[in-house]
Amino acid sequence: DGGITQSPKYLFRKEGQNVTLSCEQNLNHDAMYWYRQDPGQGLRLIYYSQIVNDFQKGDIAEGYSVSREKKESFPLTVTSAQKNPTAFYLCASSNPGQKYNEQFFGPGTRLTVL
Amino acid sequence: AQSVAQPEDQVNVAEGNPLTVKCTYSVSGNPYLFWYVQYPNRGLQFLLKYITGDNLVKGSYGFEAEFNKSQTSFHLKKPSALVSDSALYFCAVSIRYKAAGNKLTFGGGTRVLVKP
Protein backbone atom coordinates (compact mmCIF):
# COMPACT_ATOMS: atom_id res chain seq x y z
CA ASP A 1 0.00 0.00 0.00
CA GLY A 2 2.98 2.27 0.36
CA GLY A 3 2.80 5.69 -1.25
CA ILE A 4 -0.96 5.80 -1.80
CA THR A 5 -3.39 6.79 0.91
CA GLN A 6 -7.15 6.57 0.84
CA SER A 7 -9.54 8.06 3.34
CA PRO A 8 -11.70 7.32 5.09
CA LYS A 9 -11.25 3.57 5.55
CA TYR A 10 -14.96 3.12 6.23
CA LEU A 11 -17.73 5.40 5.06
CA PHE A 12 -21.44 5.28 5.66
CA ARG A 13 -23.89 7.18 3.53
CA LYS A 14 -27.58 7.73 3.59
CA GLU A 15 -29.49 7.25 0.38
CA GLY A 16 -29.62 10.43 -1.69
CA GLN A 17 -26.35 11.82 -0.38
CA ASN A 18 -23.22 12.49 -2.37
CA VAL A 19 -19.94 11.40 -0.79
CA THR A 20 -16.33 12.02 -1.79
CA LEU A 21 -13.55 9.47 -1.39
CA SER A 22 -10.02 10.76 -1.09
CA CYS A 23 -6.97 9.36 -2.87
CA GLU A 24 -3.48 10.84 -2.51
CA GLN A 25 -0.16 9.55 -3.83
CA ASN A 26 3.42 10.68 -3.22
CA LEU A 27 4.97 8.43 -5.88
CA ASN A 28 5.12 11.19 -8.50
CA HIS A 29 2.99 9.04 -10.80
CA ASP A 30 1.19 10.67 -13.69
CA ALA A 31 -1.61 8.11 -14.02
CA MET A 32 -4.28 7.41 -11.41
CA TYR A 33 -7.25 5.04 -11.40
CA TRP A 34 -10.40 4.27 -9.46
CA TYR A 35 -11.79 0.75 -9.21
CA ARG A 36 -14.84 -0.73 -7.61
CA GLN A 37 -14.66 -4.21 -6.07
CA ASP A 38 -17.74 -6.34 -5.48
CA PRO A 39 -17.67 -9.93 -4.20
CA GLY A 40 -17.03 -12.42 -6.99
CA GLN A 41 -16.69 -9.76 -9.69
CA GLY A 42 -13.09 -8.72 -9.41
CA LEU A 43 -12.22 -5.08 -9.96
CA ARG A 44 -14.02 -2.83 -12.41
CA LEU A 45 -12.59 0.45 -13.66
CA ILE A 46 -14.63 3.56 -12.84
CA TYR A 47 -12.42 6.44 -14.03
CA TYR A 48 -8.80 7.00 -14.86
CA SER A 49 -6.54 9.97 -15.40
CA GLN A 50 -3.34 10.00 -17.40
CA ILE A 51 -2.36 13.56 -16.52
CA VAL A 52 -3.47 16.55 -14.48
CA ASN A 53 -6.73 18.17 -15.64
CA ASP A 54 -7.59 15.18 -17.82
CA PHE A 55 -9.60 12.04 -17.07
CA GLN A 56 -11.61 9.42 -18.93
CA LYS A 57 -14.55 7.21 -18.11
CA GLY A 58 -13.88 3.59 -17.40
CA ASP A 59 -16.29 0.69 -17.71
CA ILE A 60 -18.76 1.72 -14.99
CA ALA A 61 -18.61 5.54 -14.73
CA GLU A 62 -22.35 6.19 -14.39
CA GLY A 63 -23.18 7.78 -11.04
CA TYR A 64 -19.57 8.75 -10.32
CA SER A 65 -17.48 11.87 -10.92
CA VAL A 66 -13.81 12.73 -10.49
CA SER A 67 -11.41 15.64 -10.68
CA ARG A 68 -7.66 15.86 -11.20
CA GLU A 69 -6.56 19.34 -10.23
CA LYS A 70 -3.26 18.18 -8.73
CA LYS A 71 -0.90 15.40 -9.71
CA GLU A 72 -1.02 13.94 -6.21
CA SER A 73 -4.79 13.84 -5.78
CA PHE A 74 -7.66 12.06 -7.57
CA PRO A 75 -10.87 12.29 -5.50
CA LEU A 76 -13.93 10.24 -6.43
CA THR A 77 -17.46 11.46 -5.77
CA VAL A 78 -20.20 8.89 -5.51
CA THR A 79 -23.39 10.70 -6.42
CA SER A 80 -26.98 9.91 -5.57
CA ALA A 81 -27.38 8.74 -9.15
CA GLN A 82 -25.32 5.63 -8.40
CA LYS A 83 -27.98 3.00 -7.79
CA ASN A 84 -25.93 0.49 -5.85
CA PRO A 85 -22.92 2.25 -4.33
CA THR A 86 -22.17 -0.19 -1.50
CA ALA A 87 -18.76 -1.62 -2.41
CA PHE A 88 -15.04 -1.55 -1.73
CA TYR A 89 -13.32 1.26 -3.65
CA LEU A 90 -9.67 1.06 -4.62
CA CYS A 91 -7.45 3.81 -5.95
CA ALA A 92 -4.26 3.06 -7.89
CA SER A 93 -1.48 4.88 -9.65
CA SER A 94 1.21 4.06 -12.19
CA ASN A 95 4.09 5.69 -13.97
CA PRO A 96 3.34 5.58 -17.69
CA GLY A 97 6.75 6.98 -18.42
CA GLN A 98 8.05 3.44 -18.05
CA LYS A 99 6.43 0.93 -20.32
CA TYR A 100 3.84 -1.39 -18.88
CA ASN A 101 4.55 -0.63 -15.28
CA GLU A 102 2.37 -2.24 -12.69
CA GLN A 103 -0.22 -0.24 -10.81
CA PHE A 104 0.22 0.49 -7.12
CA PHE A 105 -2.90 0.30 -4.99
CA GLY A 106 -4.10 2.13 -1.93
CA PRO A 107 -5.66 0.34 1.07
CA GLY A 108 -9.23 0.99 -0.08
CA THR A 109 -12.40 2.60 1.25
CA ARG A 110 -15.41 0.52 2.14
CA LEU A 111 -18.61 2.44 1.41
CA THR A 112 -21.90 1.32 2.88
CA VAL A 113 -25.24 2.90 2.04
CA LEU A 114 -27.65 2.79 4.95
CA ALA B 1 -12.20 -6.18 -26.07
CA GLN B 2 -9.89 -7.78 -23.57
CA SER B 3 -10.97 -10.24 -20.90
CA VAL B 4 -9.53 -12.45 -18.20
CA ALA B 5 -10.95 -15.66 -16.76
CA GLN B 6 -10.03 -17.29 -13.49
CA PRO B 7 -11.97 -20.55 -13.64
CA GLU B 8 -11.65 -21.47 -9.98
CA ASP B 9 -13.37 -19.45 -7.28
CA GLN B 10 -11.33 -21.20 -4.60
CA VAL B 11 -8.26 -23.39 -4.42
CA ASN B 12 -7.52 -25.49 -1.35
CA VAL B 13 -4.03 -26.85 -0.79
CA ALA B 14 -2.11 -28.34 2.10
CA GLU B 15 0.89 -26.46 3.43
CA GLY B 16 4.06 -27.60 1.68
CA ASN B 17 2.25 -28.78 -1.43
CA PRO B 18 2.48 -27.06 -4.82
CA LEU B 19 0.02 -24.27 -5.49
CA THR B 20 -1.40 -23.38 -8.90
CA VAL B 21 -3.89 -20.61 -9.65
CA LYS B 22 -5.22 -20.64 -13.19
CA CYS B 23 -5.70 -17.69 -15.52
CA THR B 24 -6.65 -17.45 -19.19
CA TYR B 25 -6.95 -14.29 -21.21
CA SER B 26 -8.29 -12.86 -24.43
CA VAL B 27 -6.78 -9.76 -26.01
CA SER B 28 -6.05 -8.38 -29.44
CA GLY B 29 -2.35 -8.11 -29.95
CA ASN B 30 0.41 -8.79 -27.46
CA PRO B 31 -0.80 -9.25 -23.89
CA TYR B 32 0.80 -7.71 -20.86
CA LEU B 33 -0.12 -9.89 -17.90
CA PHE B 34 -0.05 -9.28 -14.17
CA TRP B 35 -0.73 -11.12 -10.93
CA TYR B 36 -1.81 -9.36 -7.75
CA VAL B 37 -2.62 -10.62 -4.25
CA GLN B 38 -5.13 -9.14 -1.83
CA TYR B 39 -5.32 -9.76 1.90
CA PRO B 40 -8.61 -9.08 3.75
CA ASN B 41 -9.71 -5.44 3.69
CA ARG B 42 -6.47 -4.36 2.03
CA GLY B 43 -5.43 -3.06 -1.35
CA LEU B 44 -3.83 -5.20 -4.02
CA GLN B 45 -0.14 -6.03 -3.92
CA PHE B 46 1.80 -6.65 -7.11
CA LEU B 47 3.36 -10.12 -7.45
CA LEU B 48 4.76 -10.35 -10.96
CA LYS B 49 4.25 -9.41 -14.60
CA TYR B 50 4.91 -10.72 -18.09
CA ILE B 51 5.77 -8.21 -20.77
CA THR B 52 8.02 -10.05 -23.18
CA GLY B 53 10.90 -12.50 -23.21
CA ASP B 54 11.22 -15.62 -21.07
CA ASN B 55 7.88 -17.37 -20.64
CA LEU B 56 8.65 -18.20 -17.00
CA VAL B 57 8.42 -15.12 -14.81
CA LYS B 58 9.60 -15.07 -11.20
CA GLY B 59 8.06 -12.70 -8.70
CA SER B 60 7.67 -11.86 -5.04
CA TYR B 61 7.31 -14.33 -2.14
CA GLY B 62 8.49 -17.32 -4.19
CA PHE B 63 5.73 -17.08 -6.78
CA GLU B 64 6.24 -17.64 -10.48
CA ALA B 65 4.00 -17.70 -13.53
CA GLU B 66 4.25 -19.30 -16.93
CA PHE B 67 3.07 -17.53 -20.05
CA ASN B 68 1.68 -19.90 -22.67
CA LYS B 69 0.73 -18.10 -25.85
CA SER B 70 -0.83 -21.09 -27.60
CA GLN B 71 -3.12 -21.78 -24.66
CA THR B 72 -3.58 -18.07 -23.84
CA SER B 73 -2.81 -18.82 -20.23
CA PHE B 74 -0.77 -17.28 -17.44
CA HIS B 75 -1.00 -19.63 -14.46
CA LEU B 76 0.46 -18.62 -11.12
CA LYS B 77 2.52 -21.22 -9.27
CA LYS B 78 4.38 -21.74 -6.05
CA PRO B 79 6.35 -24.93 -5.43
CA SER B 80 5.61 -25.11 -1.69
CA ALA B 81 2.62 -23.22 -0.28
CA LEU B 82 2.58 -21.53 3.12
CA VAL B 83 -0.39 -20.85 5.37
CA SER B 84 0.41 -17.15 4.96
CA ASP B 85 -0.25 -17.47 1.21
CA SER B 86 -3.96 -17.72 1.99
CA ALA B 87 -5.46 -14.70 0.22
CA LEU B 88 -7.37 -13.55 -2.85
CA TYR B 89 -5.41 -13.63 -6.10
CA PHE B 90 -6.17 -11.60 -9.21
CA CYS B 91 -4.91 -12.00 -12.73
CA ALA B 92 -5.02 -8.93 -14.99
CA VAL B 93 -4.30 -8.12 -18.64
CA SER B 94 -3.32 -4.79 -20.07
CA ILE B 95 -3.21 -3.04 -23.38
CA ARG B 96 -1.28 0.06 -24.17
CA TYR B 97 -3.66 3.00 -23.97
CA LYS B 98 -2.96 6.17 -25.92
CA ALA B 99 0.77 5.65 -25.53
CA ALA B 100 0.60 6.23 -21.81
CA GLY B 101 -0.34 4.12 -18.87
CA ASN B 102 -2.01 0.75 -18.57
CA LYS B 103 -5.70 0.02 -18.62
CA LEU B 104 -6.02 -3.19 -16.65
CA THR B 105 -8.81 -5.72 -16.98
CA PHE B 106 -9.06 -8.03 -13.98
CA GLY B 107 -10.28 -11.56 -13.56
CA GLY B 108 -12.87 -12.35 -10.92
CA GLY B 109 -10.29 -13.52 -8.41
CA THR B 110 -9.40 -16.88 -6.88
CA ARG B 111 -9.42 -17.41 -3.17
CA VAL B 112 -6.53 -19.57 -1.98
CA LEU B 113 -6.79 -21.44 1.29
CA VAL B 114 -3.65 -23.16 2.55
CA LYS B 115 -4.33 -25.56 5.37
CA PRO B 116 -1.67 -26.50 7.96
Image (spheres, coloured by chain):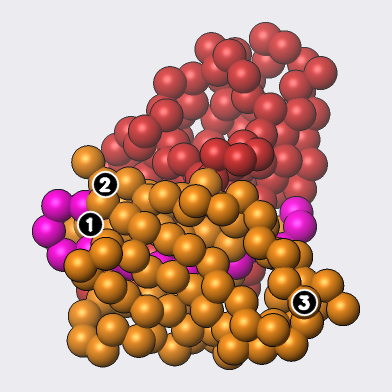
Chain colours: A red, B orange
Q: Residue at x 74, y 87 (%)?
A: B16
Q: Quadrant of residue A82?
A: top right
Quick check: is B31 in the magenta stretch?
A: yes
Q: Specify which label sits upstream in the sequence, 3 or 1.
A: 3
The mark found on residue B2 in the picture is 2
The lab-note entry on whether marks 2 and 1 share a chain reads yes
The amino acid at mark 2 is Gln
Please state the chain letter of the residue tagged with numbered disc 2 in the rendered image: B
Q: Is residue A23 left or right of residue A49?
A: right
Write down the residue under mark 3.
B14
Q: CA separation, marks 3 and 2?
A: 34 Å
Q: In this view, does B93 lie to the left or right of A8?
A: left
Could you tell me if the residues under marks 3 and 1 are in contact, i.e. CB atoms within 8 Å? no
Q: Which of marks 2 and 1 is nearer the N terminus?
A: 2
Residue A114 seen in this snapshot: yes
Q: Distance between the residues labelled 3 and 1?
A: 36 Å
| Quadrant of the frame with the N terminus of chain A | bottom right
Tell me the element at label 2.
loop
Q: What residue would you read off at disc 1?
A: B95
Q: Are marks 2 and 1 in contact (CB under 8 Å)?
A: yes
| Callout 1: SS | strand
Which chain is disc 1 placed on? Answer: B
Q: Nearer the viewer, mark 2 or mark 1?
A: 2
Q: For the magenta stretch, what is the residue range?
A: B27-41
Q: Where is residue A90 in the image (x, y as percent from the top left)?
A: 58, 49
If you read the primary sequence from the N terminus, does the residue marked by circle 3 or circle 2 appear first? 2
- Image coords of residue B10 (percent x, y): 66, 55
What type is the residue that disc 3 sits on? Ala
Position of B59 relative to B13 (above/below) = below
- Looking at the rendered image, the disc whose residue lies closer to the viewer, 3 or 2, is 3
